[in-house]
Image (cartoon, rainbow, N blue to C red):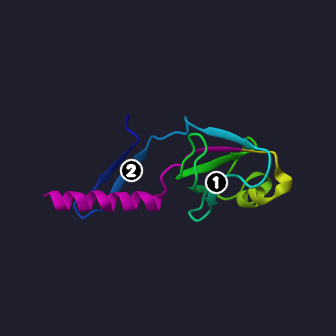
Amino acid sequence: MIYSVYIINKAGGLIYDEDFATNKHAEEHTWQQCPIPLVLTGDTGRVLVKFGEVGAVRPGYSVIAVNQKPVTGLAGPNDRPVLDIINDPESYPLTLTFGRGKVGANEKLMLASTFHSLYAISA
């Protein structure tokens, strides 16, 4: 299965990229009380699992829904920050849906430069 395609030039610049990844393997978990057994971070513009595992959810997965309502960036339902919802004991029971997020623009540029470096070393 092809997840993404990157075309780079000889100078290492990213010319074209296409991402075919979808969130077919979303994992949903419900917690009855605070705190949850995962360490979450909001550094990259989305809420990511930084440490811990629950079922198939591993580090690198992102929160894509809170109580079956989609998450946009760091904001959840009613434009309330997702991390605030998770840390608020009044929000429980809480259902979080996790999935693999799409690769961001900066991550694509880093991958392209890595591909170029590998090509330059092998040539």
Which amino acid lies under the numbered mark 2 shown in the image of this protein?
Answer: Asp
- Residue at the spot of label 1: 38
Which amino acid lies under the numbered mark 1 shown in the image of this protein?
Answer: Leu
Kindly give the residue lying farthest to the right in the view shown.
90
Which of the image's four quarters has the N terminus? Answer: top left
Element carrying mark 1: loop
Density class for disc 2 (Cα within 10 Å; few <14, some 14-19, many ≥20) is some
Q: Is residue 115 left or right of residue 89?
A: left
- Residue at the spot of label 2: 17
Image label count? 2
Q: What percent of the width, then of the height, locates residue 2?
A: 37, 38
Q: Residue drawn 63% across and 58% down?
A: 40
The stretch in magenta equals 96-123
- Vertical comparison of 3 with 43: above or below: above
- Magenta span: helix, strand or loop, mainly? helix
Q: Is residue 51 left or right of residue 16?
A: right
Q: Is residue 100 left or right of residue 76?
A: left
Element carrying mark 2: strand
Q: Is residue 121 magenta?
A: yes
Residue 80 visible in the displayed image: no
Q: Which of the two discs, 1 and 2, labels the residue nearer the N terminus?
A: 2
Q: Residue drawn 48% across and 52% down?
A: 103
- Vertical comparison of 102 with 25: above or below: below
Are the residues at dot 1 and dot 2 in contact (C-beta closer than 8 Å)? no
Q: Residue drawn 82% across and 49% down?
A: 92
- Vertical comparison of 81 with 27: above or below: below
Residue 92 visible in the displayed image: yes
